[in-house]
Amino acid sequence: MSNAIEYELKGDIAVLRANNPPVNALGHAVRSGLIAGLERAESEAKAVLIVGAGRTYFAGADIKEFGKPLLEPGLPGVCTRIERSPLPVISAIHGTALGGGLEVALGTHYRIAVPSAKVGLPEVHLGILPGAGGTQRLPRLVGADKAIEMITSGRHVSAPEALELGILDEVEEGEVEAIGLAYAQRILDAGLGPRPVGQMPRPEVVDFDTAYEAAMKRGRGQIAPATAIRSIEGACHKGIDAGLEHERNLFMALLNSPQREGMVHAFFNERAVSKLPELKGVAPREVSAIGVIGGGTMGAGIAVAALLSGLDVTMIERDADAAKAGAERVSDILQGSVKRGKLTNEKFDAIMAGRFRASDSYEALGDADLVIEAAFEEMGVKKTIFAELDRVCKKGAVLASNTSYLDVNEIAASTSRRADVLGLHFFSPAHVMKLLEIVVAADTAPDVVATGFALGKMMRKIAVRSGVCDGFIGNRILKTYRTCADHMVLDGASPFEIDTAMTAFGFAMGPFEVADLAGLDIGWATRKRLAPTRDARERVATYADKMCEAGHFGQKTGQGYYVYEKGKRGGTPDVNVTALIEAERRELGITPRAFSQDEIQRRYMCAMVNEAAKVVGEGIARRPLDVDMVLLFGYGFPRHWGGPLKWADLQGLDGILADIQSYAKEDDFFWQPAQLLERLVAAGKTFDDLNKGDTV
Ligand code: 3HC
């Protein structure tokens, strides 16, 4: 028998103990071990207990096996084999019973868990549906509506809730194997036998069509949740065997889909992105108290993120009034967390009374282990601040700038301790957004970089390493695809058509809606800053400048590309913008042409991929996966495509390069193909090959 399942006979009860660290994923060895253990138990025991060693029950199928040839026994067969055992089979659950893990538990006849355990069917987050009976057995226990909610959201359900729903039979404090054995003994003592969920009555039919439509709409192109609903529907109409077959067919179609590849890429790389080979063995510096310079939206958000991760925070503003306003902002955000039930009143009081202070004096930063500057985005301002930090901060303190564009080398040079300086680029609102770009300057010490990543982990951010360039990874790529959108507008597309096309692609918002949200003055300031060094061949749309000159800065002024009415969600297209665009086209002598949704999406994505390839080629991002995670966690890129470079791999790089080359016939300045892309196509390789260590 495989070591992945330990077998032990304890009296009348055979214990099948999974031992496949770290999460007891149900790989081939575990599945065969379960079958072998069951067979042996049936020859010598009266009941079977399935339990996990280490930190958890089974956390699901082994995701690393997806896309490889399926090895027998498959998980659906294992669950059915367990369900059909003549002996009562009991699951004792701790940690997480997720996906295939919960499906194994649903195949067993009785389920007990410790109170801290969580169960769920999160398969849709991997682009698939529960494919080992989850869509058939769960609705028999909880009803179709609840099953739809759990499976389409993929949420983790706590043991007490699972007990209430009927997924668990008992919840008990204690050591998991001990409570499992005692429960199994009670079942034997009561003379109870197998109780197969698959033989329970079919769930009642609900309004599946409405649920399907809603899931399609919410999914913004992601098909797994809606497909799962069709599988649950099967449970209402079919017996268990036919229902399982229906589920299997839908599961296999999703397993072989590009969306599954994209989602699994996202799953592994959101974990891989912060593990840098060069930081192996490098200890981060100790951080327990931090300083934040600036109490505006960004500074306050950073302060809150730090406070919620247990750090002490000192906020510095230019005078007492500004410090007070900054403190109020922090307090307001934290109060919001209290209202949403995420923070208790006691914790709020403790933070505001003991762990947070605002001051107008840099001297208050003497004890700070790390300082994050989130002041006005101007080099002169940054240099003055860093000179002050150099003066007041203790030796070894890490000095970070939250700049989104500026040269971190130049900022570091305004101190006498360049090795301690790096960029920590948060995204607004900083206490919500997951992305943190860690900008490594020429002289940043490795343990300072490690400290940035350690801070990211404490704050539960997705931290990505970036080199220094204008806009770093994310904003540099954003600038390029936004420019591509502007060119399409000049040539005949409307901003609203572009927003519609890109939300249909799967983005949460289109580029013009995003601009309205961020404030049009930001882009305006960038355009002015870059104007002196702009290449004469660059096509620049100026209608947006005219909007700004008229004081239309987007949502905050009630008008931008869209008009926003008080109390209404979202905006309606502003006709004045159309007039400005038409005037600019006339001035430039452009005869507008129609753009199909496909063409808009293709050009926009080609621009994004091309710039991303340059960012990787120049070493600003070390790996394609770094770019993918930046776009996923900071820019609303649809997760089911895995990121722009995974998307590109899935489309075929040769086709993308060919399209870029054809667009270059119209504008060979903007559409200069990235050399890395050309090399990959020539070598017949993908971006993902580079993630795996290949070179071209
Ligand atoms: N398969 C393979 N590896 C897995 C895995 C799985 N199902 N789940 C986690 N891992 C790996 C992670 O990649 C990570 O590896 P690393 O250390 O090399 O980076 C390691 O296990 C530890 O994982 P985390 O860092 O995520 O540990 P946490 O303690 O933070 O979280 C967890 C644990 C909640 C179990 C989380 O890992 C998780 O959500 N895992 C995925 C669960 C899941 O989606 N299950 C369903 C799988 S699909 C399925 O079952 C199909 C079936 O219906 C047929």
Image (tube, helix red, strand yellow):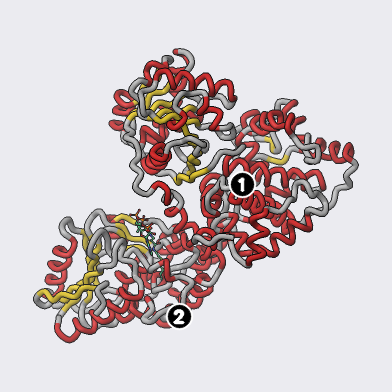
Q: CA distance from mark 1 to mark 2?
A: 38 Å
Q: In this orientation, which residue lies closer to the viewer: 407 or 182?
A: 407
Q: Amino acid at mark 1?
A: Met
Q: Badge 1, how many Cα within 10 Å: few under 14, some, many 20+?
A: some
Q: Is mark 1 within 8 Å of ligand 1?
A: no
Mark on residue 146? none
The quarter of the picture where residue 66 lies is bottom left
Residue 13 placed where, x, y %?
Answer: 14, 75
Residue 125 placed where, x, y %?
Answer: 46, 60
Whichever of labels 1 and 2 marks the residue nearer the N terminus, that label is: 2
Q: Up-down: is 434 above or below 266?
A: above
Whether residue 368 is visible, yes or no, is: yes
In the rendered image, which quarter contains the C terminus?
bottom right
Q: Residue at x 23, y 84 (%)?
A: 39
The quarter of the picture where residue 347 lies is top left
**Of tags 1 and 2, which is closer to the observer?**
1
Whether residue 164 is visible, yes or no, is: no
Q: Up-down: is 280 above or below 330?
A: below
Label 2: state its secondary structure: helix
- For label 2, the residue is 245
- For label 1, the residue is 509
Q: Amino acid at mark 2?
A: Glu
Q: Relative to 205, is 467 on the left or the right? A: right
Q: In this orientation, which residue lies closer to the viewer: 58 or 164?
A: 58
